[in-house]
Amino acid sequence: MGGRFSTKGYATGPGRAGRFKQVYRDDVQLYPDTPHDAGAAPAGVMVCAGCHAVYERKHWHFNEADFARLHQAPETLTIERCPGCQRIADRDFRGELTLVGVPALDPLDPRHQRLVATEVQARETNPIARLAEINGSPGRWQVSTTTAALAVRMGTELQKAFGGQLTIDKPPRTDLARVQWTARESHVR
């Protein structure tokens, strides 16, 4: 890091008017309430009972082999809810995807399968990225995700696979996204 953050400051000594102290990024803590920024990341090994995510070396990841290995030694293990499961429990959804012109919600529908496959793929690199819930009626599905990027990615995947029209509403500098995908031809029955 160490890049220059600001050259505005105060004179650094007597007779040094006009010279300013340089402030570096490493000296400024932008988000003091965030545990990782404050150096207070949890130590040790944890697992999430809900999704089997494993927390090791200050990083959450999915690996069933690691989960099984750690579950054999419970004395060194802490059971804790992962950030993705915590967002779902708190109903802290950051992405909203609306599918318009689709049939009634069916797990065997190729659009539903594409959504689930996209979530599994995104979860490999970011365990917080989750498909939280899908509510559907003939003609319209509402999908809630725990990250804005996952909602955008799901909409993009649907457009690549099935065509249709994609509308993305993600205001700058926010962590919220509203995405709408409209099917090419209506499948409402």
Image (cartoon, grey):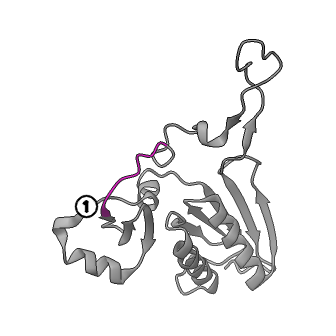
Q: Quadrant of residue 179?
A: bottom right
Write the residue at 81% across / 77% down: 164
Write the residue at 33% across / 65% down: 48
Q: Which residue is mark 1?
A: 78
Is residue 70 one of those drawn in magenta?
no
Write the residue at 51% across / 45% down: 37
Left or right placement of residue 28 versus residue 85 in this view: right
Q: Quadrant of residue 169?
A: bottom right
Left or right placement of residue 54 versus residue 152 in this view: left
Amino acid bearing label 1: Thr
- Asked whether residue 100 is in view, the answer is no
Write the residue at 19% across / 78% down: 72
Label 1, secondary structure: give it: strand
Q: How many marks?
A: 1
Query: What's the magenta bit mostly, secondary-structure-wise?
Result: loop
- Asked whether residue 14 is in view, the answer is yes
- Frontmost residue, 38 versus 83: 38
Position of the C terminus, as image quadrant, is bottom right
Left or right placement of residue 38 versus residue 183 in this view: left
Q: Is residue 42 above or below residue 155?
A: above
Where residue 127 sits: x, y (%)?
A: 49, 67
- Residue span colored magenta: 38-45
Residue closest to the far left: 75
Q: Is residue 161 above or below residue 61?
A: below
Left or right placement of residue 33 versus residue 167 in this view: left
- Frontmost residue, 124 versus 89: 124
Where residue 183 sits: x, y (%)?
A: 77, 76
Where residue 5 sits: x, y (%)?
A: 72, 39
Where residue 52 sits: x, y (%)?
A: 35, 72
